[in-house]
Image (cartoon, rainbow, N blue to C red):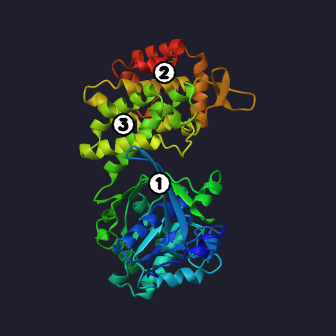
Amino acid sequence: MKTLNKIHQRKVERPEKILQFGEGNFLRAFADYIVDIMNEKALFDGNVVICQPIENGLCDLINTQNGIYTLVLRGRENGETIEKTRVIESVSRCIDPYRNFESLLEIARSEDLKIIISNTTEAGIFFCEKDKFDDVPPSSYPAKLTRFLYERFSHFNGSSLSTVYILPVELIDNNGSELLKCVKQYAHMWNLPESFSLWLDKCSFSNTLVDRIVTGYPKKDIEEISEKLGYTDNLLDTAEPFFFWAIEDKKGLKEIFPVHKTGLDAVFCDDISAYKMRKVRILNGAHTISVLGAYLSGFDIVRDMMNDKVFSDFIITALKEEVIPFIPLPEAEKEAFASSVLERFNNPFIDHRLLDISLNSVSKYKARCLPSLLDNIKNGKFPKRLLFGLSCLIEFYNGQYDDNGHFTGKRNGNTYEIRDNKDVLDFFNGLNSTTDKVASVLGNTDFWGCDLTEIDGAVPFVKDTLDLIKKHGVKATMEHL
């Protein structure tokens, strides 16, 4: 079977308007995908040059295929199971700054460059005092970026026309603001001129929020997919159909990077916090209030949970009555997002294991569910489904340390591992000798930042729920909420 680069050539050569730090599956299925669509729709007319962010990466493989690769979108959309294929041509090449640092600085001197995108993992945006200006290259991404931007500033003599738009998509709060903070720390540590810092303020470091599950190279299905395509592709990438990108734009980015005109769900706004709240409370929150109870009921993956009417009805009602009303976005947007979440949970191509989602459930409940719970209380509503989710958490964490030091619980006589921070596990281990377990958990202000026993009715509700779960099981108890 022929390879992709033998049968497919790039149709149009375009200027390299985007520098991208990161060559992994996510950016290729997200940012490079939407750039390809913009080019097809004559909205952008620019390609992406990738910088490999770490010493060992995909640079050689990308260049072997001339930057071209296949993206397969698989999942549920508008009530149907779909599988769509697209050959992505928006990546022109990849550079390796560890073998040729000058190739990175050369891009800094390009008049074509307008935008910098990055995804260097959540741990990528950090300040490292060991990085030096003369390192070839500096180790951290923010240090590389600072060196790159200073090269651009110097080459264009600080001209305002040389400023760039910077779009980090790392999954941390205020990713653009945090990246700018790191860059300015390097500028200070390296004694770069004040005029450079003033030039940085003219650039745009946007906070962003991205949402798409990218499943990457499909090892299990690659032979079947290659047979359908009629060629092999060592860079083939897979993702769900759902796409969302929110970008804070205060300096006119949408005029030159009109992702909102592609037909995909991409928005520019002054503040992305409401969209972050929507994702955390609806998507992540729905997971957190349901998966622990689903696992205790005998399910192992999200899709099987969603195919059970009791659990799917529980999630739908919880979102509709206890979560969605308190998110400050238009009703149509919230409801459409909630509907898409239910479809995404039911993706037949993703086996999302409930035990994987269970990791660090205490901190997840605090971040994802507790704000909705407290909003209900403030508005005179008793959030029994959110509290039911908390009851399932307590039951799921009913375990003890084994001889190997693992904290384990039991499901139908079989052992499962409970994974969380040691202080959390030590607390639940200590509850084995506690008479009032519910009050101890709800009153743990280290967990929740407040005392949940002060909520009228919370302690007796959770106690009664746990008693019913022990007698009848999670599903039967849930069915009669």
Q: Is residue 93 visible?
A: yes
**C-alpha gap between disc 2 and disc 3:** 25 Å
Task: State the SS at label 2.
Answer: helix
* For residue 21, side relative to residue 193 (left or right): right
Task: State the SS at label 1.
Answer: loop
Provide residue 319's location: percent of width, then percent of height: 35, 34
Mark 1 crowd level (few <14, some 14–19, many ≥20, 10 Å Cα): some
Residue drawn where x is 41% and y is 25% of the image: 387
Q: Are marks 2 and 3 in contact (CB under 8 Å)?
A: no
**Comparing marks 2 and 1, which lies closer to the viewer?**
2
On residue 171, the disc is: 1
Q: Earlier in the sequence, mark 2 or mark 1?
A: 1
Provide residue 431's location: percent of width, then percent of height: 57, 21
Task: State the SS at label 3.
Answer: helix
Report the front residue among 90 and 162. Answer: 90
Residue drawn where x is 25% and y is 30% of the image: 379
Image quadrant assignment for residue 407: top right
On residue 475, the disc is: 2
Mark 2 residue type? Lys
**C-alpha gap between disc 1 and disc 3:** 20 Å
Report the front residue among 474 and 398. Answer: 474
Q: Earlier in the sequence, mark 2 or mark 3?
A: 3
Mark 3 crowd level (few <14, some 14–19, many ≥20, 10 Å Cα): some
Provide residue 172's location: percent of width, then percent of height: 46, 54
